[in-house]
Image (cartoon, grey):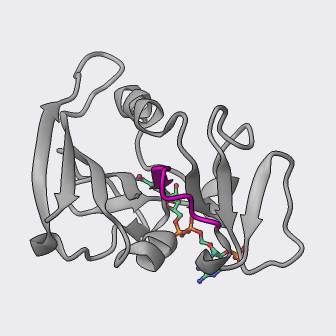
Amino acid sequence: MISFVWAEDENRVIGKDDTLPWKLPDDMKRFKEVTTGNPIIMGRKTFESFPNGPLPNRENIVITRNKNFSYPGVTVVNAISDIQMDTQKNYCVIGGAQIFELFKDLVDRLYVTKIHHEFSGDVLMIDLPWENFKLVSSEEGKVDEKNLWPHTFEVYDRK
Ligand SMILES: NC(=O)c1ccc[n+]([C@@H]2O[C@H](COP(=O)([O-])OP(=O)(O)OC[C@H]3O[C@@H](n4cnc5c(N)ncnc54)[C@H](OP(=O)(O)O)[C@@H]3O)[C@@H](O)[C@H]2O)c1
């Protein structure tokens, strides 16, 4: 199956200056819980936003048009048809917007963190056919001195 995992603000902002517009450790924790053990699929820009290279304990699959791109520990593909999908696995598409667009007709499950705040940014989440999805869980995130903005973890499954 294919899942999307992302966080967006009240205006669907997801990125700014090739990085995240916010620091929200509670969402990072959630991201780790959802994705660890699963292959993660991302665009080259999102991959390059990671400070320490590939994320551990997950197969990292990076999509680029650059035929010469390589990075230790990373599976590089030039098109989604190059990904050898194993039907037993949960492929987590983790962005950014260009890569969500490529998978939007294929995705089975959505893990979205809704951050109840407005940030400035330059990348928005794509339009999804929400009428084809149903909410299956909703959970409030933790707010404290390290997690300043209220946020909700929602999961949707394709109907
Ligand atoms: N809030 C969140 O949950 C979240 C999640 C992920 C990312 N982000 C943010 O989103 C921003 C990045 O998103 P983005 O949409 O600009 O970039 P992206 O999707 O991460 O990467 C774009 C790159 O993917 C490759 N690509 C795109 N379409 C392709 C295709 N059809 N075939 C082959 N390769 C293709 C190209 O790489 P080449 O240029 O190398 O060819 C392109 O430049 C950053 O600010 C990041 O921090 C936020």
Q: Nearer the viewer, residue 106 or 49?
A: 106
Q: Where is ligand 1, by quadrant?
A: bottom right
Figure check: 115 above or below 44: above
Figure check: 109 above or below 68: above
Figure check: 87 above or below 101: above
Residue at the location (57% across, 48% down)? 39
Left or right of 88? Residue 110 is: left
Residue 85 in the magenta stretch? The answer is yes
Q: Nearer the viewer, residue 90 or 134?
A: 90
> Residue 73 occupies which quadrant of the picture?
top right
Residue at the location (66% across, 57% down)? 61
- Residue 113 image position (x, y, % from top left): 27, 45
Is the magenta region chiefly helix, strand or loop? loop
> Would residue 20 be visible to someone looking at this image?
yes
Q: Residue furthest right?
A: 68
- Residue 63 image position (x, y, % from top left): 66, 69
Residue at the location (59% across, 76% down)? 80
Residue 77 in the magenta stretch? The answer is no
> Would residue 18 be visible to someone looking at this image?
no
Left or right of 68? Residue 147 is: left
> Residue 101 occupies which quadrant of the picture?
bottom left
Q: Nearer the viewer, residue 145 or 66?
A: 66
Region rendered in magenta: 84-93
Residue at the location (71% across, 43% down)? 54
> Residue 79 occupies which quadrant of the picture?
bottom right
- Residue 88 image position (x, y, % from top left): 48, 51
Which part of the image, by quadrant, shows the N terminus?
A: bottom left
- Residue 19 image position (x, y, % from top left): 54, 52
Which part of the image, by quadrant, shows the C terminus?
A: bottom left
